[in-house]
């Protein structure tokens, strides 16, 4: 019979073989410390019009409500850093959207990891998550010792910064739990000072002001108060990560599916202005940019060109 330590090592080794940057484990229990913070954040309306954030409050805080009998939360990071850049002066999209949609890539890897667990450990009840359910991924990754939640509310590590995706497996077997690491933001306020819309305060974000929210989550028109404050972002925003000192340690990803699509990097300002729905569907097939739909992207581009 495998010990908790051997099971844990097996899972971490399999995760590494699948290309994950790192893997940590925490106990599946109620997130007591996060509960009042989440409640206050919602009461303050900092989730904007993301009504789904108000739903399943208990499930968001207790993984045992998502997977009955859950004992462990396995958190995983997958690097997406890309040092390639779009042309100067064109509408910008976040680095994570240069290649194939991360949901597709990570789900495939997680299913393989779960299959390895079935094959090597035995019958396990569990689920995998990539932004697909009310799971507080940064809280679990922090508890799993994969990094600390920084002043920009992103998970940060000393070794590679913060350009990575977070995913989880919630399973009903005991594993060896990791311990959190210390916060290394210190007195730095680079992310707060650089945020174009002043969405950040230390360790807190007003999502209703965040450019990523405005260009992706918001379905209505972008409020006029953000005119000339969008820093030319058409999809997402990387500012608070680009200025973070820890991201000087970022290394390019090794996942071929995250490689930049040439069309995205070669697009000129004129190409963006004349973007048709057919071109959008072709260039952004299986891309995270599809999330905002053609109409949403055109709305963003129009707002930038006012």
Image: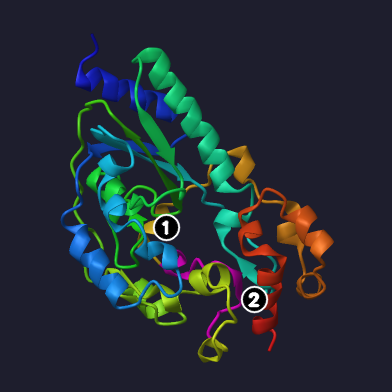
Render colour scheme: rainbow
Q: Nearer the viewer, mark 1 or mark 2?
A: 2
Q: Quadrant of residue 241?
A: bottom left
Of marks 1 and 2, which one's residue comes earlier in the chain?
1
Asked if residue 197 lies in the magenta stretch, the reply is no
Which of the pair 122/249 is nearer the observer? 122
Residue nearest the observer in this picture, 225 or 92: 225
- Which quadrant does the N terminus fall into? top left
Residue 260 seen in this snapshot:
yes
Q: Look at the picture and state if 103 lies above or below 23.
A: below
Q: Position of residue 296 (x, y in %)?
A: 66, 70
Q: How far apart are marks 1 and 2 (CA)?
A: 30 Å
Placement of the C terminus among the 4 image quadrants: bottom right
Q: Position of residue 42 (x, y in %)?
A: 31, 71
Question: Is 159 on the left or on the right of 37, as rendered?
Answer: right
Q: Give the residue furthest to the top.
A: 1
Q: Position of residue 284 (x, y in %)?
A: 71, 55
Is residue 188 at all visible to an observer of this figure?
no
- Write the start and end of the magenta stretch as one range: 229-243
What number is the disc on residue 198? none
Name the mark on residue 248.
1
Image position of 120 with respect to 58: above or below:
above
The percent position of residue 87, horizontal first and vertical second, equals: 70, 67
Left or right: 291, with 6 as reference point: right
Other residues around mark 1 within 10 Å, as few (<14) / some (14–19) / many (≥20) = few
Residue at left 46%, top 45%?
130
Provide the secondary structure element on which disc 2 rests. helix
Residue 242 in the magenta stretch? The answer is yes
The residue where tag 2 is placed is: 300
């Amino acid at each position: 019979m495998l010990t908790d330590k051997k099971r844990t090592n097996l899972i971490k080794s399999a995760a590494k073989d699948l290309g994950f940057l790192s893997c940590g484990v925490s106990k599946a229990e109620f997130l007591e410390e996060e509960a009042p913070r989440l409640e206050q954040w919602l009461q303050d309306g900092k989730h904007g019009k993301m009504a789904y954030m108000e739903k399943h409050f208990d499930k968001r805080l207790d993984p045992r409500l998502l997977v009955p009998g859950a004992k462990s939360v396995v958190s995983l990071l997958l690097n997406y850093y890309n040092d390639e850049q779009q042309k100067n002066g064109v509408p910008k999209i976040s680095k994570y959207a240069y290649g194939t949609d991360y949901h597709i890539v990570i789900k495939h890897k997680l299913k393989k990891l779960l299959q390895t667990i079935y094959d090597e450990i035995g019958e396990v009840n569990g689920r995998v998550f990539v932004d697909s359910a009310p799971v507080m991924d940064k809280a679990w990754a922090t508890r799993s010792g994969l990094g600390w939640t920084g002043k920009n509310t992103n998970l940060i590590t000393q070794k590679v910064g913060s350009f990575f995706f977070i995913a989880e497996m919630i399973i009903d077997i005991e594993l060896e739990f990791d311990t959190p690491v210390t916060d290394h933001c210190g007195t730095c306020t680079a992310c707060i000072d650089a945020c174009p819309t002043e969405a950040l305060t230390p360790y807190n974000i007003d999502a209703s002001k965040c450019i990523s929210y405005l260009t992706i989550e918001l379905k209505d028109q972008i409020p006029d108060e953000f005119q000339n404050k969008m820093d030319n972002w058409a999809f997402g925003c990387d500012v608070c990560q680009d200025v973070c000192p820890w991201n000087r340690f970022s290394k390019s990803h090794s996942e071929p599916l995250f490689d930049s699509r040439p069309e995205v990097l070669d697009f000129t300002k004129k190409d963006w202005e004349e973007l048709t729905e057919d071109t959008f569907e072709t260039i952004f097939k299986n891309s995270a940019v599809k999330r905002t739909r053609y109409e949403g992207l055109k709305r963003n581009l129009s707002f930038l060109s006012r």
